[in-house]
Image (cartoon, rainbow, N blue to C red):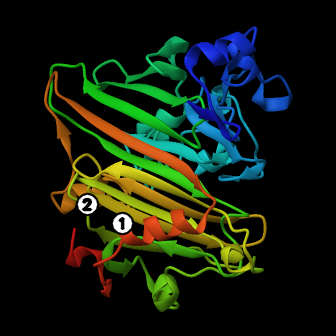
Amino acid sequence: MGIYGKEYSVNDLRRRVGNMDQIAGVRVVQLDDGNERPTRAAILHTGAGLEITVLLDRCLDIATASFDGQAMGWRSTTGDVAPQYYEAEGIRWLRNYFGGLVTTCGLNNVGAPEEGSELSGNGLHGRIGNTPARDVKVTQEWQGDDYIVSVEGTMRQTALFHENLTLTRRVHTKLGAKRFWIEDTITNDGFTTTPYMLLYHCNFGWPVVDAGSELISPSRRVAPRDAIAQDGKAEWNRFHGPTHGYDEKVYFHDMAAADDGFVTTGIVNDGFKRGKGFGAYVRYNQDALPRFTEWKMLGEQDYVVGLEPCNCGVQGKHIDDELGLLRQLEPGEHCEVSLEFGAITTEAEVATLREQCSGVTPTLTESYRDFV
């Protein structure tokens, strides 16, 4: 086991600490200020500089993530908000959208609200991200030579006469790691075929995103969502500083997976040119998440780039339905999703990311409908 620049056996480490949380572990807490109260959270740390905060009452989403004190994710002006303040209608989802490194969107809708959402509740990005976890389990234990720290739980999205879907999530990492994993299983626990939409809103912020930062991805094709994104589409993978009055730009990507079926993409800042750069990445299984959206929002305070693996579009359930792209789960059927997140701190890691994305030359197209 390598930690703090030296190698130790399991027994050597156990002899040096009275409790393993001295170097790695999970602390379960309750957020207790303002409208975050009384959200439960779990704080995981690995002893290698990685610390993440998992909101147990918000779908086990990742509210904060940092490495050696540098933020990987972006935080919105709302801060953490307890789920009882969720407003389902229209775009009011934004009232408690904390950003974070990961916000889960779905399962009944992703993207634009459904018409009449004040009745259906299928507002912007759905309701799963505001669902508290049940059957929460915390693990802090040696498994062979690895000291595993994890938290898991189940979110249930259901209503009388409607869908009966569950999302079981495990967030885990280990002693000495600078990365962590999210393992999800989405199950149709009902007895009727049920459509489901799923998007992982992975929000990278400063200092990952800054003037001179670059998105590195195995994009085969890139399409702007609208006329706003069309203007500046040649710079889809380049970022500048915060801009007053910036209009968000959204791009749809057709990604090339590696031989193992996974896609890796990330953002690195230009600090590597000066010998001290920083970046972060996400890696995911494309069979479960065949589509990908880039959210480029370089405004003041709203300074974020969303890398969003998904199984759907972001223009609303009705559009996917019209295009015949709405995914379904049969009774008892389940879908498994695996995501990995980590910090990028060395030139060698940047080179590895570029190698994983090499051999692909992106083509700019006029419409995402050309390749969905």
Question: Residue 58, relative to residue 98: is it above or below?
Answer: above
Locate residue 10: give its quadrant: top right
In the rendered image, which quarter contains the C terminus?
Answer: bottom left
Question: Which residue lies under the disc numbered 1?
Answer: 356
Q: Position of residue 301 (x, y in %)?
A: 78, 64
Q: CA distance from mark 2 to mark 1?
A: 7 Å
Question: Residue 352, relative to residue 98: is it above or below?
Answer: below
Q: Sequence-wise, which precedes: disc 2 or disc 1?
A: 2
Task: Return the mark for residue 296.
Answer: none
Question: Which residue lies under the disc numbered 2?
Answer: 258
Check contact, mark 2 vs mark 1: CB within 8 A.
Answer: yes
Task: Provide the secondary structure element on which disc 2 rests.
Answer: loop
Task: Provide the secondary structure element on which disc 1 rests.
Answer: helix
* Amino acid type, residue under disc 1 in the picture: Gln
* Amino acid type, residue under disc 2 in the picture: Ala
Q: Residue at x 54, y 12 (%)?
A: 141
Query: Relative to the observer, which residue lies in front, 46 or 211?
Result: 46
Q: Residue at x 47, y 87 (%)?
A: 233
